[in-house]
Image (cartoon, helix red, strand yellow):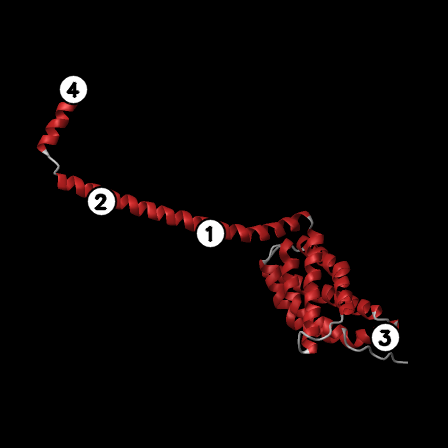
Amino acid sequence: MFVSFIKNSFKLAHKYPISCHQLQHSKMMYSQISKTSREQMSKCRHFSSSVGASCGNKVGFIGWYLQMLDSRPILTKTITCTLIVTAADLTAQTIVAGSFSGQYDLIRTMRVAGFAMVILGPSLHVWYNSLSLFLPKRDVVSTLKKIALGQILYGPTMNAIFFSINAAAQGESSSEIVARLKRDLVPTAVNGLIYWPICDFITFKFVPVHLQPLVVNTFSYVWNIYLTYIASQQKVAASA
């Protein structure tokens, strides 16, 4: 059978001869195709490695932060909140001073940061987890309920606590603190109704629960610039 196969092969080669020119042309075509394939493969490997390195760097920090949220949620949210509130207070002082070369009241900044670390940061974790527990859906009705609860309960409560603690830390008496609350609390609540509902809608509707404090802290950067400015106003003379 093998001998028969060899004979048939020679017959076909004799019947359909291949010229040297055709053979050389085939070799050239094969060489060009191989070269093009190697170049394309090299580009693909380079592109893949570049994209992989870029994605790896991004995923590195984000992945670490998400891991910290899972392993130490309260601590991570509290530190994040403290950093953002501190930055907001320094920004407020810069705006009032009119330049970056102004003298900063670091005692004031420490008061604000202490409030964020001890009260605001942990309370954000408890508040948003509680809302998710009692109102787990993300439909429009549930989202509006969460917004209403925030504007009626959480927001005014945090504002009152912040104004009171900040005033007490500056040495104001109880009557002066009450006078300050009467002056500042209602206008602050009204301005909160203008700013916060759209921020809360985005947060409650589209953001996962464990990331909601981070998003809210991001929104609160602008709000805390205003809030720390209001809290730094002169005390109100208590009525007799």
Residue under pointer 1 = 51
Considering only order in the chain, which callout, 4 or 1, is on the residue closer to the N terminus? 4
Can you tell which of label 4 and label 3 is closer to the viewer? 4
User: The residue tagged with tag 2: helix, strand or loop?
Assistant: helix
Q: Crowdedness of circle 2 by 10 Å Cα count: few (<14), some, many (20+)?
A: few
| Residue at x 25% of width, y 43% of height | 31
Three-letter residue code for mark 2: Met
Residue under pointer 2 = 29
User: The residue tagged with tag 3: helix, strand or loop?
Assistant: helix
Q: Where, by quadrant of the figure, is residue 184 drawn?
A: bottom right
Q: Position of residue 132 (x, y in %)?
A: 66, 54
Can you tell which of label 3 and label 2 is closer to the viewer? 2
Residue under pointer 4 = 3
Q: Crowdedness of circle 1 by 10 Å Cα count: few (<14), some, many (20+)?
A: few
Q: Where, by quadrant of the figure, is residue 199 drawn?
A: bottom right
Residue under pointer 3 = 176
Three-letter residue code for mark 3: Glu
Which is more toward the observer, 47 or 69?
47
| Residue at x 80% of width, y 73% of height | 181
Q: CA distance from mark 4 to mark 2?
A: 33 Å
Considering only order in the chain, which callout, 2 or 3, is on the residue closer to the N terminus? 2
- Quarter occupied by the C terminus: bottom right
Q: CA distance from mark 4 to mark 3?
A: 115 Å
C-beta proximity under 8 Å, tags 4 and 3:
no
Can you tell which of label 1 and label 3 is closer to the viewer? 1
Q: CA distance from mark 3 to mark 2?
A: 92 Å
| Residue at x 14% of width, y 21% of height | 4
